[in-house]
Image: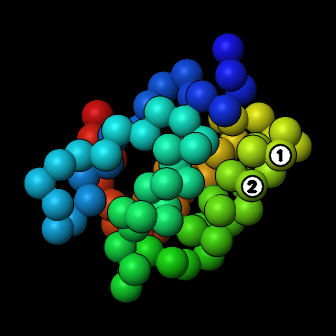
Amino acid sequence: MDMKHWDYSVKLAIAGTDNFQNVRSTMEAADCLFSHWPRKRGSGKAYAAAMNVIADVMDGRKPAADARSAFITAALEADIEIVH
């Protein structure tokens, strides 16, 4: 299995959209952070940390689970709802 894929996806409800984002991998997390993240409140310390962890995972320096954890922390910081 590709180590960049996550065991469990993270489903987000991002304000201003009618759709949910179902993030299943480190690559999808990077895309979400770049393309779908709220700019006003979503670029704090946890966002920056998530971007750094994602880069480390993509380079093979950290496991994919670290990217998932950092991504969730960034979502919580940005007040993005995580749907269960």
> What residue occupies the far top of the structure in this picture?
1
Q: Residue at x 11, y 54 (%)?
A: 18
Residue corresponding to mark 2: 55
Report helix, strand or loop for mark 1: loop
Q: Bin the neighbour count of mark 1 within 10 Å (Cα to Cα): few under 14, some 14-19, many 20 and up.
A: few
Q: Nearer the viewer, residue 17 or 41?
A: 17
Left of 44 or right of it: where is 20? left
Q: Position of residue 37 (x, y in %)?
A: 39, 67
Q: Are marks 1 and 2 in contact (CB under 8 Å)?
A: yes
**Quadrant that contains the N terminus:** top right
Q: Residue at x 76, y 44 (%)?
A: 57
Q: Residue at x 74, y 55 (%)?
A: 55
Q: Bin the neighbour count of mark 2 within 10 Å (Cα to Cα): few under 14, some 14-19, many 20 and up.
A: some
Asked whether residue 69 appears in the rendered view, the answer is no
Q: Position of residue 84 (x, y in %)?
A: 29, 34
Q: Residue 36: which disc?
A: none
Whole-Å distance between the Cαs marked 1 and 2? 6 Å
Left of 61 or right of it: where is 74? left
Q: Position of residue 81 (x, y in %)?
A: 29, 54
Q: Residue at x 80, y 51 (%)?
A: 56
Please tell me whether residue 43 is drawn above or below residue 17 in the rendered image: below
Please tell me whether residue 74 is drawn above or below residue 58 in the rendered image: below
Q: Position of residue 4 (x, y in %)?
A: 66, 32
Residue corresponding to mark 1: 59
- Quarter of the figure with residue 69: top right
Left of 40 or right of it: where is 51? right
Q: Amino acid at mark 1?
A: Asp
Q: Amino acid at mark 2?
A: Ala
